[in-house]
Amino acid sequence: MKIGIFGGTFNPIHYGHLRAAEEIAEKFLDEVIFIPTNITSNKNIDAEAHPQKRLEMIKIAIKDEQKFKTSDIEIKRGGLSYSYDTIIEFKKKYKNDDLYFIVGADAFLGLKNWKNAEAILKTIDFIVAGRPKYGFKNLVKLIDFLPDNLKENAECDLKEGKIVIDGKRAVYFFNTTRLDISSTVIRNNFKNNISNLFLLPNGVINYIINNKLYE
Ligand code: ATP
Ligand code: MG
């Protein structure tokens, strides 16, 4: 099977995440596994809803969609969450499947600062989803955002819309619908009593209100 691993804080999950996953899955994957962080390493923890609650919101959002799954692997591991650890664990667990790591374009641009970025890119293929304000018209320029050691051996395959690293690993760029939705805006809307209708599933909105998550 072709399985996409979609990591993130998901504080909360919204239609930007869900629509990108839907379009990528339709073209490319059999399954997408949403993996909420326990503690996101590059974010302020004060603004973060409890990991179990972020996981619960994912469950609510994907409950009617068979090909979407979620995993508490990072929550169980505890502490700061690093994608590298998750990818290594998944590689062991899903030996006979093809794994892909899904990120939005903004996350891809920050990739070289991740823990073990180089090792990650040597271990798993990436799928990058579009995000407003982050174009990828010029694939050659995107090579600049790879860790330094990988740049030399990276090539663009313009026809396939991907960067190939060391002749084998790929970073695919998918021009998904760019929904200008972010969890930050949603959290601020809740704080300021501004409507969030149609930015995220109703079930998730109700869960947030009932649990007073972003007041
Ligand atoms: P925050 O505003 O709190 O950073 P966010 O909306 O960016 O939240 P994250 O949990 O940070 O959501 O993102 C998880 C992953 O989903 C990242 O790889 C990010 O690039 C991607 N992503 C988030 N929003 C979108 C969107 N609207 N379209 C496509 N990808 C997205
Ligand atoms: Mg973000």
Image: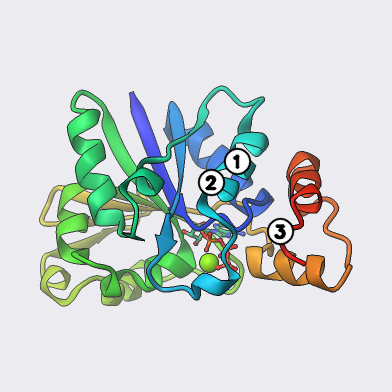
Residue depicted at 60% across the width and 35% down the height: 59
* Residue displayed at 37% across by 73% down: 110
* Residue wearing tag 3: 213
Question: Which amino acid does the dot numbered 2 rest on?
Answer: Gln
Residue named by callout 1: 56
Residue 211 visible in rendering: yes
Q: CA distance from mark 2 to mark 1?
A: 6 Å
Q: Cβ–Cβ below 8 Å for labels 2 and 3?
A: no
Q: Quadrant of residue 50?
A: bottom right
x and y, in percent, of residue 40 in the image = 42, 64
Find disc 2 in the rendering and name its residue. Answer: 52
**Residue shown at 39%/39% (left/top)?**
4
- Circle 2 — which element? helix
Dot 1 amino acid type:
Glu
Q: Nearer the viewer, residue 134 or 80?
A: 80
Q: Are marks 2 and 1 in contact (CB under 8 Å)?
A: yes
Closer to the camera in the image, 174 or 116: 116
